[in-house]
Amino acid sequence: MMNQLVSGLAPMHPGELLREDILPALNKPKAEIARLIEVSRQTLYDILAEKQDVTPTMALRIGKLTGTTPEMWVNMQRNYDLRVQAVKDADIIARIPTLEAA
């Protein structure tokens, strides 16, 4: 069951957390962050702009750089994807019955 306090909020893409909270706290240029995690600047910029997903590989790199777990980043991406898709498919999902085992 979804928490009523956050149910009306838009889902947060992991790139938003990186852009708004993590990178400013690290106080390093984005180009240096990209170099440190060994990706192109464009790849990092696409994640920050929420145009690219945080993949398991990227989650491992970001987790190591930030001292967080890769699971946190993968779970945030998964939750974001599920919430976005649930909105897109709301009408279809509403028509599907929930069956119970006999």
Image (tube, rainbow, N blue to C red):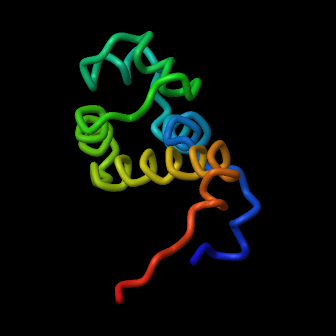
Q: Count the marks: how many?
A: 0
Is the residue 94 above or below the residue 35 in the image? below
Q: Quadrant of the N terminus?
A: bottom right
Judge left or right: residue 83 versus residue 71: right
Q: Quadrant of the C terminus?
A: bottom left
Q: Position of residue 80 (x, y in %)?
A: 53, 47
Q: Residue at x 45, y 38 (%)?
A: 26
The one nearer the camera, 16 or 88, is 88
Judge left or right: residue 20 versus residue 63: right
Q: Residue at x 32, y 38 (%)?
A: 62
Is the residue 19 above or below the residue 71 in the image? above
Q: Residue at x 27, y 25 (%)?
A: 37
The one nearer the camera, 43 or 75, is 75
Judge left or right: residue 1 versus residue 59: right
Q: Position of residue 78 (x, y in %)?
A: 42, 49
Is the residue 84 above or below the residue 1 in the image? above
Q: Position of residue 16 (x, y in %)?
A: 58, 38
Q: Which residue in the rendered view is the most extreme toward the bottom?
A: 102
Q: Which residue in the rendered view is the most extreme toward the front?
A: 102
The one nearer the camera, 36 or 62, is 62
- Occupied quadrant, residue 39: top left
Q: Which residue in the rendered view is the most extreme toward the right?
A: 8
- Occupied quadrant, residue 44: top left
